[in-house]
Amino acid sequence: MCGDGATIGEPEIFVIGGNGSGIPVYRKLQRQGIPFITGVLHTNDADYQVARELAAKVITEKPFECISRENYQKALEAMKKCREVYCPLKDFGTMNARNQELLKEAEKLGKLKKIG
């Protein structure tokens, strides 16, 4: 796909982003025409604003809430269907602790790739 907007198609890459860390990755994947999914993003996160325009799908959580088990499960199932997982996010706190669980699962599944 060329130009602006979300890439169309079945997501190939799952991005564990947040706090602005995913924005460069989202833009790069969109420029390359690679459909991707990202999550779990709080809807007041800087990443969310860009992801909702560029990602094939965004899994979200309410602002200031811990990531729910339901949204974690949605993300995990989506991640398992993707060929690779990128994690530009380096800091995990109370509200996004389940994203760290996603990272550990990606490592176990052998899907975690270095961004480069």
Image (spheres, rainbow, N blue to C red):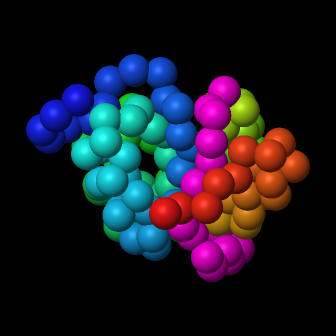
Quarter residue 52 falls in: top left
At 50% from the left and 55% from the top, the residue drawn is 41
Residue 84 locus on image (x, y percent): 62, 42
Q: Is residue 62 visible?
A: yes
Residue 86 locus on image (x, y percent): 58, 55
At 50% from the left and 46% from the top, the residue drawn is 38
- Asked if 75 appears above or below 94 in the picture, the reply is above
The outermost residue toward the right is 108
Quarter residue 53 falls in: top left
User: Relative to residue 6, is residue 55 drawn left or right?
Assistant: right
Magenta region, main secondary structure:
loop
Residue 84 located within the stretch drawn in magenta: yes
Q: Nearer the viewer, residue 115 or 27?
A: 115
**Where does the N terminus fall, quadrant-wise?**
top left
At 62% from the left and 32% from the top, the residue drawn is 82
Residue 18 locus on image (x, y percent): 49, 65
At 80% from the left and 46% from the top, the residue drawn is 110
> What segment is highlighted magenta in the picture?
81-95
Quarter residue 97 falls in: bottom right
The outermost residue toward the front is 116
Residue 55 locus on image (x, y percent): 37, 40
